[in-house]
Image (cartoon, rainbow, N blue to C red):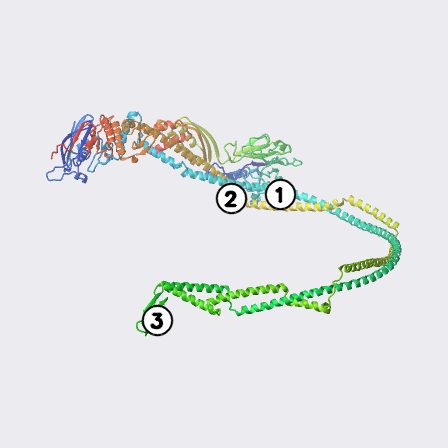
Amino acid sequence: MPRFLHTADWQLGLRLNYVPGDHGASLRRQRFQTVERIAEIAHEKQVEAVLVAGDVFDSNILGNDTLQLAVDAMHSFGEIPVVLLPGNHDPGTPDSILARLKKLNPQLHIALTSEPLVFGNLEVHPCPLLSRHTFDDPTQRLPVRGSSEKIRVALAHGGILQFTEEKDTANFIDAEAVLEKGFDYLALGDWHGLFQYNDRVWYSGTPEPTRFKEKQPGYILLVEIEAPGMVPEVNEIEAQQTRWLQEDFEFLDDGDITLLERWFSRLERPSSTIVEMSLKGTLTLAGRSHLEEQLSDFRERLLYLRIRDEQVVDQPKAEDWGTFIQDGLLLPVLDVLEERKDPADEEALRLLYRLLKEQT
Amino acid sequence: MIIHSLTVRDWRGLSIATQKFHAGLNLITGPNESGKSRLVEALRFGLFESSKGKAAYKETLATKGRLSGNPNVTVEFEIKGQHWRVEKEFLGNKVQALLNGPKSFKGEEAEDRLADLLEVGKSGSKQMKDEDLGIWPLLWIDQGHSLDPPEQLNPKNRTRLLDQITGEIGETAIGPRGQSLMLRVRAEAEKYYTSKRGDELGQLKKARQRLEKLEKELQEALKASRLASENAEQLVLLQETATDLEIRKQKQMLALESARLKKEELLDLKNQLERCDLELSEVRKQKQERDDLEFKVQVQLEQKDQNEANLEQQRLKGAKLNAELQTIEQKTLKASETLRICKEKYQVARRKQEKALAQRKANFLSEQLGKAQSARQRINNLSTQLSDLPDVNKAHLERLESLQHNIEVAKGTLEANSIVLTVLVGEPVEMNKKLRHSGEKVSIRFLEDGSFRFGSHRFNVQLKGIEQQKWQTIRKDSQIDLDQLLENLHLESFQQATEIYTKRQTLESKLESAKRELRSFATEGIEELALSLEQLQRRWGEDLEVLIADPDDEELGKLFLEESNAEESLVQYRSFRDQLQDQKIVIESEIASTSTNLERDKMELESLRIQLGNFPEMTELQKNEQQRLGKKAALMQRFSEKGGEDGLEDAKRIEKSNESLQDQLIENQNKIIRLQTLIEQASGQGLHELVQELEAESVVAQDELSRIERQGLAAKRLRDVFEQAMQEKQQRFAQPIMQRLQPYLQQIFPNAEVKLNDELELVGLCNDYFEAGFEDLSGGAREQLSILVRLGFAELLAQTESFPLVFDDALVNTDAQRISRMQRVLFQAAKNTQILLFSCHGELFDELGPDKRIDLSTVEHTN
């Protein structure tokens, strides 16, 4: 029974612009390791081919060092045929990076034309994007089945009709029309989350997430089709190497900081984990200071930590100021700052607290 | 605290009995050296300095003299209702202090206890400094320090004052921690912004610059990356264009091929047409030529007939002219004879008249010649006479006259000044070679230097006057010039010159007259006259000698008229004859010419007839022309069907656009190559990584800038709030001092306010119109203000415990009027505080109204 891996949107060479320094660089490299992981799965599942539905690279104008990383990573597929389809990020234009890749590894099947590829009983019809801005349905010219008795799979990149959440893809695909032409499966790329349109039409999503707002990223699909016309059996396999978490947390008082610490300490692999955390609630200045120290610690330990703390309100308590409150200068100063008329007052209070702490 | 009394012994030579002070205003006066300063010094030492030790500043306190004891001071005072008495002896071997009050203390314990009571530092062997003296420097003005501002508040002072104010206004003061925090807050703000202009600084500035730099780099990278993508897309378009152009070119090549075939056909037709046109024009030419010849024959025939008619007429005209000519020849011969006869008659009459005229003229000329010759004889005589005389002209005469005049004048002058030497001769003597006789009186006049001989003696006479000399010179020089001129003119004397000049004048006048006469007789000269006469005589010869009568003019005129008439007739006949002869020549030439023409016409006509015989007949020529026209029409029809001239242009046009298409293809290909090269170059450069890297760095830099900016703004805000709070606090804290100070201030400086800084220190004075720093005030104002501020502080302190004010010569720079006002202020202030006012000018404080007055010049000295 023919089986193949359906994946897409590897976006090799992508660098997340909000993750600074070494963590950013390591996330960029992570994507190549994920390719190796996919190769592992391919070997393990003994697939007949690996179909990548576009956006293998994040751009055509990537450097040779990035290209070499890709060559090295794809080396791990060994004899398994890998079909790489140009997407809107790496279209088959004259500067195509996939064409450059092909020169370095001629074994790879770079689908720069719609010429069908046959692997055993599997007939793959690529629908490459040959321009960055295509407004036509790339599947439009797919041939009807005719006399073929093979399992026919169409490989395309773009949004499907009535699927408008991803606004930046103009090349909508009429999935029903593809199926009507006698295709058993339509392997789609572009949408970064795992998505099933119907039994035969799937988006695998990106194997490694790129954003917090992506829905169900991190998977590849193992597709098995017994015979032409049979309903495909599609299995999701998790491939992602990084964990992306979004968490909301509310403080009722300084004591809740301990709960937050506990949450962080329970994370499985912090060095591979990316967290976006929204905080709210009220803290004393001492509490706030302690929180900052803790967050600074977590920031170092996690792959990336994004904190949204606009909703944390500092509520200075008398004990924040200690005996200093007796000095004739502090009370009038606090009276002004605590009115929070100036946008800088909140931060000014924290600074005052820090200066006092440093003084004592 | 109140100081009740002071006793001093052996204090730099001063020992006085116990002086008691009043709890209010005390005035201690005394001239210099009366002990005033030593008294103040003793009070200071008694209260604040330790009796321990013999430091140099204490050694000076000793009184010189063997019997003197150590310096000793006793002060009695009351503090917080308790009476105390302190006695100190300095320069002793150990601590010599006693403090007696509710309890008694000795030695160092007494010193320590006293320091506690007075709230000052514990003094050791070193002299006390202002900062150790607690509140006292504020209350005490030493001699010579009246111009100083109130001492800086030491921490203890400030705390005490602030405590006092805090108690009064119910507000906590800014403590040392507040002050220190304030400094830190300022320092924090100045990490981010300059204090003056608020410009960004340090890490804030760096973060902003970094972000700007990154954003610039990012923009450049984005531009390069966009360009790379655009190039790729452009290349696709160009490749599509290339394909399109290739297809169009193929199509055009086909069109060109067919256009070329058509062109060849059209060119062939065109050649045939041209040949046909040539033939047609040949036939038409023959037709035309034949036509022309026939016309010429016709013309030639007409011309021949005309010429024959003309010849006939001309011959008739010639015969008529010959007959006329014979008649006029005869008339001319007759007229010529008549004229010859008239001419002869006239010649004879004319000769006769001329001869008469010549006779008269010869007579006249001969008479004139005689007169002229006589005149010339006279001229010759006169000229000879003139040339015999010396040549004296008017200039000579004037010069001679002038010299003669000079001599006369000089002589006259010399004579007028001459001397006469008169000698009466005794014995006969030869005098100037002339013998003089006895009794003879000889006078010798000397007009100039001279000498005379007297016997064998020679006497020289010299006239010495300058005038004389000058005139002598004039006379001599003039005489020499005169003589020279006369000699040149070969004359003897001036008189002779005058005479000769007059004579010459007369002769010249006569000569002129004779010349005029000669000119009137012989205008052209005598020779010419003689020649004219001779010619006349030669011409007429002897005829002249026989006189004849004058001829009749009327006869002569008649003869002349006859001759003229005959001549005129002859001229008329001859002219008419000449005309006829001319006409005859003309008509003969015409006859000859017409005969020649007629001969030529005949020959021409013959030649034309031969030429005409060579051409085909006209009908044949017309038939030929019709055939050619038919052929041409058929060719035109075919040419037009094949596209005509436009068809020929089509090939050219398609060829041209084909070239243009080829150019486009090449240009497109060049662009493709260029873009391919660019893409080749860009690929592998890692533009995308660069953009992403820069984006990441920009995001980080932006976060960093926001963070630092937030901190900076917070620091700035915190500083502003602190400054504001501080200022308000200071204003509130200065208020109680101002309240107390103001009544006194108004008396001395109406409408003014003092300015205190945040350390409660006096910095100056201001009112609505001016503001002056303490140092800028006059000396008088400074010491007055200094006292007033101390009064204010003292009153503020007196809320809990009153302290005495000690002023030693504190108003030395103040004028009498101000001192008078200050006395009122001091009098009022003393109601709340004890004041010890020391002055060496007691007379200035007569209006002070002290509670106690001590005149040191009158106090009892105990040594």
Residue at 60% across, 63% down = B516
The answer to whether B288 appears left or right of B396 in the picture is right
The residue at which mark 1 appears reads as: B239
Q: Position of residue B473 (x, y in %)?
A: 39, 65
The residue at which mark 3 appears reads as: B452
Depth check, front residue: A145 or B788: B788
- SS for callout 3: strand
Query: Which chain is disc 2 placed on?
Result: A
Depth check, front residue: A284 or B769: B769
Please tell me which of labels 3 and 1 falls first in the chain: 1
Q: Are marks 1 and 2 on the same chain?
A: no
Q: Are marks 3 and 1 on the same chain?
A: yes
- SS for callout 1: helix
Q: Say what amino acid the circle numbered 1 marks.
A: Gln
The residue at which mark 2 appears reads as: A65
Q: CA distance from mark 3 to mark 1?
A: 156 Å
Q: Say what amino acid the circle numbered 3 marks.
A: Phe
Q: Give the foreground label among 1 and 2.
A: 1
Q: CA distance from mark 1 to mark 2?
A: 30 Å
The answer to whether A125 appears left or right of B454 in the picture is right
- SS for callout 2: helix
